[in-house]
Image (spheres, grey):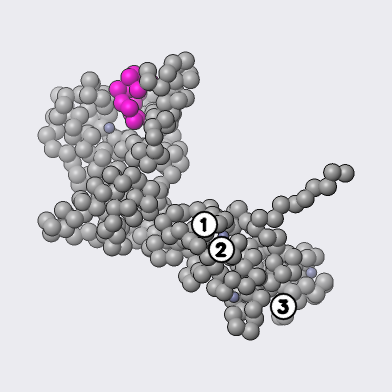
């Protein structure tokens, strides 16, 4: 006989969430839930649209079959396999995100084994059981995708800010914020669990220095960034995380910490293991730096078209090793 639980196990939900953050090496938010699920060989993830297509029916019918508008996790005890199915047609990606974190909670908390059921819907469980599982899964989701200890440590007490940094809905952000305030009133202290130290320090880096250029959508985490090193834009969005500029606007050759090429950008000479900054084969200047060498002279990264401190062009842009960020080659019609 299964013992009926009467109280949610908050401590367990919290510690599983913390462990999962460490295990998946999370150091930025929002978390890519699909990739998290993909690391478990006993979990398959499907969308309501895919299911509707397979079953040749409407998403509304899938909602009915699963008794949930947002998503479910089913368990097949015989094959020991889980299936997460989520509604990809809901209005916001933040809602999908929460649903996936919630289902992940059911999975790690082993609610199916606990209840001996293949689904966790109201029809299959007693009200009390259902409520306990829901509360635990939500509590897990809160600690996984909006970890209160991190939010408290970075002193973030604005729900809009929490929502944009962690990629959750305003409601979810506000609930976490209220939870922190209430807990503090009760004398609960939020310490960063030691297994989250790395996650925390990398996230702090983003809070302090992360910026996205409004013009070219490049994302940077550079101290003293005043100008975009890709497009020379000066307007940044602190809350939005844009694209990786290294991937989107790559350079031609890698450079070392002093901006000096590891391969000549012109003749591809790889034997640059000598003092001096000119290629010994073609005499090309090897360093990518701010072209204002009198007042600035900052060494730049290999894809920098402009100096991030003063906005002057980089030597690589001036010497045509790099093209302008919005350069489009012209193909002649012959
Ligand atoms: Zn649930
Ligand atoms: Zn830019
Ligand atoms: Zn050369
Ligand atoms: Zn400069």
Q: Which label lies toward us, 2 or 3?
A: 2
Queried on whether the Cβ of the residue with tag 2 lies below 8 angstroms from ligand 2, the answer reads: yes
Q: Earlier in the sequence, mark 2 or mark 1?
A: 1
Q: Which residue is label 3 attached to?
A: 277
Which is more N-terminal, label 3 or label 2?
A: 2
How would you rate the neighbour count of disc 1 (Cα within 10 Å): few for under 14, some for 14-19, many for 20 or more?
some
Q: Quadrant of residue 41?
A: top left
Q: Nearer the viewer, residue 277 or 273?
A: 277
Q: Which residue is mark 1?
A: 214
On-image quarter of the N terminus: top left
Tell me where residue 252 appears, x and y as whole percent: 70, 60
* CA gap, disc 2 and disc 1: 7 Å
User: Between residues 218 and 102, which one lies in front from this camera angle?
Assistant: 218
Whichever of callouts 3 and 1 sits on the residue coming sooner in the sequence is 1
Label 3: few (<14), some or many (≥20) within 10 Å?
Answer: some
The residue segment tinted magenta is 62-77
**Disc 3 from disc 1: Cα separation:** 35 Å
Q: Is residue 68 magenta?
A: yes
Q: Are marks 2 and 1 in contact (CB under 8 Å)?
A: yes
Q: Is residue 192 magenta?
A: no
Q: Residue at x 63, y 56 (%)?
A: 249
Label 2: which residue?
Answer: 233
Instruction: Say if 262 sits above or below 117 in the image.
Output: below
Q: Residue at x 75, y 52 (%)?
A: 329
């Amino acid at each position: 006989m299964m013992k009926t639980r009467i109280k949610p196990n908050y401590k367990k939900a919290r510690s599983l969430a913390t462990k999962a953050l460490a295990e998946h090496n999370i150091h930025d938010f929002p978390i890519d839930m699909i990739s998290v699920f993909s690391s478990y060989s006993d979990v398959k993830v499907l969308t309501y649209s895919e299911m509707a297509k397979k079953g040749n029916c409407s998403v509304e019918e899938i909602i009915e079959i699963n008794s949930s508008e947002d998503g479910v996790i089913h368990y097949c005890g015989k094959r020991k396999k889980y299936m997460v199915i989520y509604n990809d047609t809901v209005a916001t990606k933040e809602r999908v995100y929460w649903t996936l974190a919630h289902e992940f909670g059911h999975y790690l908390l082993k609610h199916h084994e606990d209840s001996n059921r293949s689904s966790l819907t109201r029809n299959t469980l007693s009200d009390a059981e259902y409520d306990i599982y829901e509360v635990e899964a939500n509590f897990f989701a809160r600690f996984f995708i909006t970890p209160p200890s991190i939010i408290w440590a970075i002193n973030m007490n604005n729900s809009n800010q929490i929502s944009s940094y962690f990629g959750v809905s305003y409601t979810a952000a506000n609930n976490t914020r209220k939870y922190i305030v209430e807990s503090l009133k009760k004398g609960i202290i939020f310490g960063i669990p030691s297994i989250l130290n790395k996650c925390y320090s990398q996230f702090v880096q983003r809070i302090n220095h992360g910026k996205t250029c409004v013009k070219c959508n490049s994302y940077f985490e550079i101290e003293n960034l005043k100008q975009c090193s890709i497009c020379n834009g000066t307007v940044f969005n602190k809350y939005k995380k844009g694209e990786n500029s290294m991937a989107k606007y790559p350079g031609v050759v890698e450079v070392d910490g002093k901006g000096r090429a590891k391969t000549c950008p012109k003749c591809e000479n790889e034997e640059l293991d000598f003092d001096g900054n000119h290629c010994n084969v073609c005499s090309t200047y090897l360093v990518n730096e701010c072209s204002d060498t009198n007042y600035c002279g900052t060494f730049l990264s290999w894809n920098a078209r402009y100096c991030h401190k003063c906005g002057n062009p980089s030597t690589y842009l001036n010497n045509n090793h790099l093209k302008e960020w919005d350069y489009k080659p012209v193909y002649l019609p012959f």
